[in-house]
Image (tube, rainbow, N blue to C red):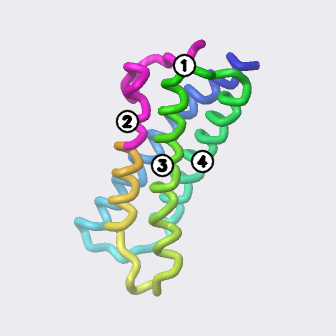
Amino acid sequence: MFTGLLHAHSGLRYVVLIAGIAALTWALFGLVTKRPYGRPMRILGAAYAGLLHLQVVLGLVLLVVGATRTEVWIHMAIMLCAAVVAQLPASILKRRPVEERTFGIHAGGILLSLVLIWLALMPFGIGLFGSNAFAP
């Protein structure tokens, strides 16, 4: 069971990374072209945040099942921060009037969460595209 969850967690990271890059690209494109903020940004931001939340849940399950190395706890703490940061743009912008919604908040939140994800991988000595070093 642990191995299956580990493979799911490891494979999902690529989907999270693709969603994050897509959302960041759209946010930066919107900033540069001064497009009106709209539905595509909300969808991309929500998809990225949702996939990242799923990744965190899988990580929590792995912790419960038996990943106990110190690096795993550091990784989990940073990933929880990344998930919170990824959710913040949608939560902030939901309370603003439509005319005050901007791509900048999404770009900043997504970029910061991607940096946190990269930092969370560092204790294992792997990069965003490296092999998974979670094995016990």
86 sits to left or right of 64: left
Task: Say which mark, if any, is on residue 53.
Answer: 4
Q: Earlier in the sequence, mark 3 or mark 4?
A: 4
Label 4 secondary element: helix
- Residue at point 50% right, 67% down? 90
Q: Earlier in the sequence, mark 1 or mark 3?
A: 3
Q: Which percent across, then down, holds residue 96?
A: 46, 83
Contact between labelled residues 4 and 3, with CB atoms less than 8 Å apart = no
Task: Characterize the local packing of mark 2: few (<14), some (14-19) or many (20 or more) Cα atoms within 10 angstroms.
Answer: some
User: Where are the magenta residues, as a range?
Assistant: 116-136
In reply to whether residue 5 is colored magenta, the answer given is: no
Task: Characterize the local packing of mark 4: few (<14), some (14-19) or many (20 or more) Cα atoms within 10 angstroms.
Answer: many
Label 2 secondary element: helix
**Real-space Cα separation, disc 2 to disc 3, in angstroms:** 12 Å
Contact between labelled residues 2 and 4, with CB atoms less than 8 Å apart = no
For badge 2, the amino acid type reads Trp
Query: What residue did someone put label 2 on?
Result: 118
In reply to whether residue 133 is colored magenta, the answer given is: yes
**Real-space Cα separation, disc 4 to disc 2, in angstroms:** 16 Å
131 sits to left or right of 63: left
Query: What residue did someone put label 3 on?
Result: 81
**Real-space Cα separation, disc 3 to disc 4, in angstroms:** 11 Å
- Residue at point 51% right, 55% down? 84
**Real-space Cα separation, disc 1 to disc 3, in angstroms:** 19 Å
Query: What residue did someone put label 1 on?
Result: 134
For badge 1, the amino acid type reads Phe
Contact between labelled residues 4 and 1, with CB atoms less than 8 Å apart = no
Q: Earlier in the sequence, mark 4 or mark 2?
A: 4
**Real-space Cα separation, disc 1 to disc 4, in angstroms:** 19 Å
Q: Earlier in the sequence, mark 2 or mark 3?
A: 3
**Real-space Cα separation, disc 2 to disc 1, in angstroms:** 15 Å
Quadrant placement of the N terminus: top right
